[in-house]
Amino acid sequence: MTDDRLPLTVLGGWLGAGKTTWLRHQLRTGPKAHVLVNEAAGVAVDDALLQAAAGVAVLAGGCVCCEGQGGLVAALRHIVDRRSAGEPIPPLILETSGLADPAAILLLLDGDPILSRHIRLTEVVVLVDALNGAADLTTDALAVRQIRAASRLILTKTDAAPPLATARLVATLLALNPAAQVEAAVAGLAVPLPDLKADPLPLGTGLRPVTAVTLPLPPGVDWAVLSLWLSALIHVHGDRLIRIKGVIRTPAGRLLLQTVRQQVQPPEILPEGLGRDDHLAVIGEAPDVAALTASLARFLG
Ligand SMILES: [Zn+2]
């Protein structure tokens, strides 16, 4: 069950959300990383970033979620080739352009037979500007897609925003993506979120609310079969499912199975006592428990 694929973090967020500032701080204080920067506008990479990273490559040729996809695949394949030849490569961080949809990048990696075998997506970090994020979210579908693709959302510039507005933005982010971990950072440094209750902002029309449902699993379900069903499910409904997470009991111990957007993550052994056994939590745009239960029963025969 060991996964020796090269870890990749995708860093996204709207234009001006402070991605480079945040990344520079993480590189200075955290573990070594090889950084791939995709600036759709071809802006030169920050010198400080160059000094802090183990290596930096600039991906020109357009935004890697759309017209620049070929460049990203070529760059990543080159890196995994070097690693396969024995060169030590630190974990990768891909800083996307402000107009990238991280979900499109995940689909691209997942759909590439070489990259999906050699690269493991660890998290999708999306930065949200506490001053302007709310306006972007209520007007732009791409900003919403970025929020929904995230596993971790970090509000930036919270020192300059009124605490109640920040609390409202947090409530909105959680309404859009209840599975995400929400944090705040000022100039790259983690800071607490305001301890205030607030209602989410009204979502634009056409944006459907995300809900979470729980699905019981038959005891003794085979994890490999369940993984196959999850793959089939996200293949058909992937755009409406944000995350599926479940703990099953196997002879080898308690196993965590989860999907993030269109990817089924490798199973992980969990210690005793964390989470509920033999249940799946499904988070997405109004998941239908009856339909999911029937589909699973058919699949299990
Ligand atoms: Zn794009």
Image: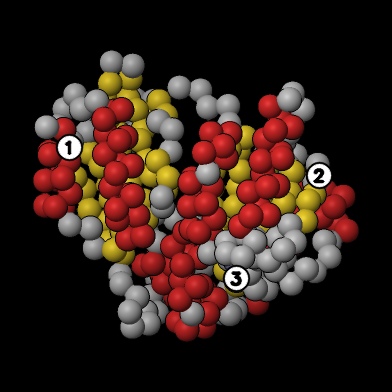
| Sequence order check, earlier mark of 2 and 3 | 2
User: Identity of the amino acid at label 1?
Assistant: Phe
> Which tag, 2 or 1, sits closer to the chain's start?
2
- 3 versus 165 height, above or below: above
Q: How many numbered markers are drawn?
A: 3
Q: Residue at x 40, y 61 (%)?
A: 177
Which residue is disc 3 drawn over? 99
* Residue 245, quarter of picture: top left
Q: Which mark is residue 55?
A: 2
Q: Are marks 2 and 1 in contact (CB under 8 Å)?
A: no
- Residue hosting label 1: 299
Q: How is the image coloured?
A: secondary structure
Of badges 2 and 1, nearer the viewer stands 1
Q: Nearer the viewer, residue 279 or 198?
A: 279
Q: Quarter of the picture for ligand 1? A: bottom right
> Of the residues tagged 3 and 1, which is closer to the observer?
1
